[in-house]
Image (cartoon, rainbow, N blue to C red):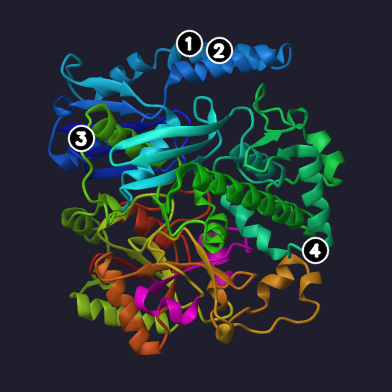
């Protein structure tokens, strides 16, 4: 049985094809169209999935969409009526779109699929699953646990913004939920907007900014109390309510009331290219502290309600690796699992798995080793076509050992390498198959990659990828981290002592001071967003790390996504080559071919 799961029309459109409960392919539409967070119907992703499986669209047995549009429209209507007359213009402008596209989504999906090929909907079922059920299914059914608490926190699905569920075998039960307009995800997005970053895309930048000031900083404490006193009411069980007089997202295209926020915090809304001040950093720090506090309380409630020693997380907030690590440190649960595509793209996987396990009542298989390398694979013909366009001295082909020896030598010489291998990763993090790699020891490496290659903000930290068996030598860590979804502090022996007045410095002054012996992957608070690798997960990356350790004594490399600012991660050989040529990367590796500038 072939099941196609689809997410679309909001952000991060994706398609996932199952054969029974085995994943054939999982791909995001943005990787094909090169439109970051593309919301369009994933035509290209579906076509590639069908090509990979060797089937036509008419051979799909079930298509499942990750949302219930009528429930969402009910929320839109009720929200508008509750806010009359505010938002009348917004309502009038959006209503035709809802009537034409969203209310008749069933017809729209059918028409889009018919463009791909002839399909008989008397044979092929078209189903819709609730948004938070898709999120829950995406993480629980791919986890190694037969029973678990499940927590989903995001912006909003149909009505739910936060859900506590319990999964056992092939069943998922919703225990408790918080409903729109009260949303931790939308609170975080509101601050993302106020701090000058893009909503539904750059929330991770706010998380990366937060550690530049201490939780004890006077300005941080001031903003923390303003947020708790004016913007949100917290309850002991983790539930919360936003003070909606400060927010405009229920009835407007804007997240917040700018002037009210400027008066509340005493600072102007930042524009994207403005310099970051300590006030902006303090606001990000205060928000992160409150997010972690709410997140832990919700997980405590999930523990009390489920009685489980396991927890599975999903939704956009589950990509907040700092909050995830705080949960790990709390020892509330013995085991924590997060599916690597925790955002809306991952809900396409959840929609398909919910169909198989719940709709068809199939028994679960053992998912003890989820494979995140589920995407586009570069064919030999594609690579040869690229090589034919180039002078013979601009590339060379090698066997595995020769290639790794050459790359390790280049890395040890402080060269920056584009690294493209096998199938693309599933989710927003590059996990070693579409990565930029470099030595983490040079003091200028972070600024060099940020400004000359990634062309992004200088404050952004880089993540280390490290041999699993060596990780505990460098980091204080309680479990492996194969999907780069937790942060861990460097052990004291690797840290540098900070100057006495370090906290008082401006952000860029803090940035240039080396915090450890591996400054390019050490964040301001001595933490790192770690990816651990073993031979079974990614053999070639494992061998490269092993060879780098033999050459330098260091078992880790910088691993950042292979893209530049505002572009999706590269997918094809041509995309990788084009990105390589327009940046100051030194070498490009695609499979076993080495490209030179």
- Alpha carbon separation for disc pair 2 and 4: 46 Å
Q: How far separated are the C-alphas under marks 4 and 3? A: 53 Å
**In the drawing, what numbered circle is on residue 99?**
1
Binning the other alpha carbons within 10 Å of mark 3 as few (below 14), some (14 to 19) or many (20 upward) gives some
Residue hosting label 4: 217
Query: In this view of the protein, which residue sits in the foreground, 364 or 471?
Result: 364
Callout 1–callout 3 Cβ contact below 8 Å: no
Pointer 4 with pointer 1, Cβ within 8 A: no
Q: Which residues lie in the magenta part? A: 446-475
Query: Dot 4: within a 10 Å radius of its alpha carbon, few (fewer than 14), some, or many (20 or more) residues?
Result: some
Is any atom of residue 223 visible in this view?
yes
Viewed as shown, does residue 536 lie left or right of 219? left
Give the number of the disc on residue 177.
Answer: none
Q: Quadrant of residue 261?
A: top right
Residue at mark 3: 362
User: Could you say whether the residue bearing mark 4 is in a helix, strand or loop?
Assistant: loop
Query: According to the image, label 2 marks what residue?
Result: 95
Quadrant location of the C terminus? bottom left
Residue 305 lies, in percent from the top left, at 50, 41
Q: Residue at x 73, y 38 (%)?
A: 233
Q: Is residue 42 visible?
A: no
Badge 2 element? helix
Residue 181, magenta (yes or no): no
At numbered mark 1, what does the secondary structure look like: helix, strand or loop? helix
For the point 23% across and 20% down, the residue is 125
Q: Is residue 368 left or right of residue 450?
A: left
Query: In the displayed structure, does residue 155 sit left or right of residue 31?
Result: right
């Amino acid at each position: 049985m072939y099941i196609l799961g689809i997410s679309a029309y909001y952000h991060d459109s994706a398609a996932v094809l199952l054969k029974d409960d085995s994943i054939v392919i999982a791909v995001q539409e943005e990787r094909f169209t090169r439109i970051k967070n593309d919301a369009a119907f994933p035509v290209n992703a579906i076509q590639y999935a069908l090509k990979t499986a060797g089937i036509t669209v008419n051979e799909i047995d079930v298509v499942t969409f990750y949302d219930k549009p009528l429930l969402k429209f009910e929320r839109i209507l009720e929200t508008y009526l509750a806010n009359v007359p505010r938002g009348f213009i917004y309502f009038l402008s959006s209503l035709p779109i809802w009537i034409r596209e969203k209310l008749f989504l069933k017809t729209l999906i059918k028409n889009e699929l018919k463009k791909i090929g002839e399909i008989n909907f008397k044979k092929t079922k078209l189903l819709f699953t609730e948004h938070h059920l898709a999120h829950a299914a995406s993480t629980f059914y791919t986890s190694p646990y037969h029973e678990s608490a499940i927590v989903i926190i995001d912006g909003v699905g149909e009505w739910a913004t936060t859900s506590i569920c319990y999964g056992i075998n092939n069943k998922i039960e919703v225990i408790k939920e918080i409903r729109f307009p009260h949303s931790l995800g939308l609170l975080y997005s509101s601050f993302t907007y106020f701090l000058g970053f893009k909503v539904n895309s750059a929330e991770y930048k706010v998380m990366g900014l937060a550690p530049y000031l201490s939780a004890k900083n006077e300005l941080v404490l001031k903003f923390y109390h303003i947020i708790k006193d004016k913007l949100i009411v917290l309850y002991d069980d983790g539930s919360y309510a936003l003070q909606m007089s400060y927010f405009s997202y229920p009835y407007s295209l804007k997240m917040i009331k700018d002037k009210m926020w400027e008066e509340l915090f005493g600072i102007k809304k930042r524009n994207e290219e403005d310099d970051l001040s300590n006030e902006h950093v303090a606001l990000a720090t205060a928000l992160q502290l409150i997010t972690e506090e709410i997140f832990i309380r919700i997980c405590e409630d999930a523990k009390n309600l489920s009685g489980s020693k396991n927890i599975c997380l999903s939704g956009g907030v589950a990509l907040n690796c700092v909050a995830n690590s705080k949960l790990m440190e709390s020892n509330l649960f013995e085991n924590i699992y997060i599916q690597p595509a925790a955002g809306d793209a991952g809900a396409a996987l959840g929609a398909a798995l919910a169909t198989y396990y719940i709709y068809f009542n199939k028994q679960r298989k053992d998912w003890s080793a989820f494979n995140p390398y589920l995407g586009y694979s570069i064919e030999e013909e594609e690579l040869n076509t690229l090589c034919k366009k180039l002078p013979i001295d601009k590339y060379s082909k090698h066997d595995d050992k020769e290639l790794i020896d050459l790359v390790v030598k280049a890395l040890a010489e402080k060269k920056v390498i584009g690294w493209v291998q096998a199938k693309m990763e599933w989710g927003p993090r590059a996990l070693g198959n579409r990565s930029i790699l470099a030595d983490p020891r040079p003091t200028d490496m972070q600024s060099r990659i940020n400004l000359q290659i990634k062309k992004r903000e200088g404050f952004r930290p880089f993540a280390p990828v490290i041999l699993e068996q060596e990780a505990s030598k460098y980091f204080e860590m309680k479990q492996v981290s194969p999907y780069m979804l937790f942060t861990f502090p460097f052990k004291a022996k690797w840290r540098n002592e900070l100057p006495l007045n370090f906290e008082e410095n401006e952000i860029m002054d803090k940035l240039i001071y080396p915090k450890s012996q591996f400054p390019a992957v050490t964040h301001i608070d001595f933490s790192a967003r770690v990816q651990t690798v073993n031979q079974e997960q990614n053999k070639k990356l494992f061998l490269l790390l092993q060879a780098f350790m033999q050459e330098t004594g260091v078992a880790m490399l910088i691993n950042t996504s292979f893209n530049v600012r505002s572009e999706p991660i590269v997918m094809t050989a041509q995309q990788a080559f084009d990105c390589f040529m327009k940046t100051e990367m030194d070498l490009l590796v695609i499979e076993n071919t080495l490209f030179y500038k």
